[in-house]
Image: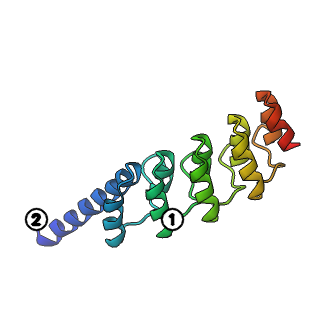
Amino acid sequence: MNKTFYLLLAFIITINVQAQDVFNAARSNNIAELETLIKNGTDLNQTDQRGFTPLILAVYNNGSEAAKLLLKNKANPDAQDASGNTALMGAVFKNNLEMINLLIDNRADINQVNSNGASALIFAATFGNQQIITTLLAAGADKTIKDNRGKTALDHAILQENKEIIKSLK
């Protein structure tokens, strides 16, 4: 085989290794590795086989330093995984108010919906965290968004029989 083939093969292997490394570094909050990958021009908005970006993985795994570094280096806070879920939705699911505030501060779309039509507010109403509901509403969350079943955040709070959240969403 010729030299060009081997150079191309080495390049493809290097790209694949870097891609895997960025996901592992984000997942494990490995700042040193992330900084090296950023310096080497790694795409911070690439997705893995499940559609997760490094930011989504950092947020879901409570990697606040990794999330801050990724956002500082232009990671898209509104990127969606294969199900349409965003880092903000992941932070709501994990009940991580620090990450929610970080994403809001970095202009995450508070009203973005996933493939089921659910917004972060609908997630919060379903999981029943009043502090998160208050934070999302203060950031401009739209109470009128309906999921694919026609249910609003209030409807989900009623299903959960969470009186405090029902009161907040009325």
Please name the amino acid that badge 1 sits on.
Leu
Q: Residue 93 occupies which quadrant of the picture?
A: top right
For label 2, count other residues whose C-alpha is less than 10 Å away and answer few (under 14), some (14-19) or many (20+). Answer: few
Is 3 or 127 nearer to us in this picture?
127
Q: Which residue in the structure is indicated by mark 1? A: 71
Residue 107's x, y, as percent?
64, 65
Residue 116 in sight from this viewpoint: yes
Residue at the right extreme, as displayed: 170
Horizontal relation, residue 146 to residue 15: left or right: right
Q: Secondary structure at mark 2?
A: loop
Q: Residue 138 occupies which quadrant of the picture?
A: bottom right
Residue 45's x, y, as percent?
47, 62
Q: Quadrant of the N terminus?
A: bottom left
- Precedes in sequence: disc 1 or disc 2: 2
Q: Which mark is residue 24?
A: none
For label 1, count other residues whose C-alpha is less than 10 Å away and answer few (under 14), some (14-19) or many (20+). Answer: some
Please name the amino acid that badge 2 sits on.
Met
In the picture shown, does residue 104 fall above or below 50?
below
Asked if disc 1 and disc 2 are in contact, CB closer than 8 Å, the reply is no
Residue 122's x, y, as percent?
73, 42
What distance separates the C-alpha of mark 1 from that of mark 2?
A: 43 Å
In the picture shown, does residue 149 fall above or below 3?
above
Q: Which residue in the structure is indicated by mark 2? A: 1
Mark 1 or 2: the one toward you: 1
The residue shown at (51%, 52%) is: 56
Is 143 or 169 nearer to us in this picture?
169
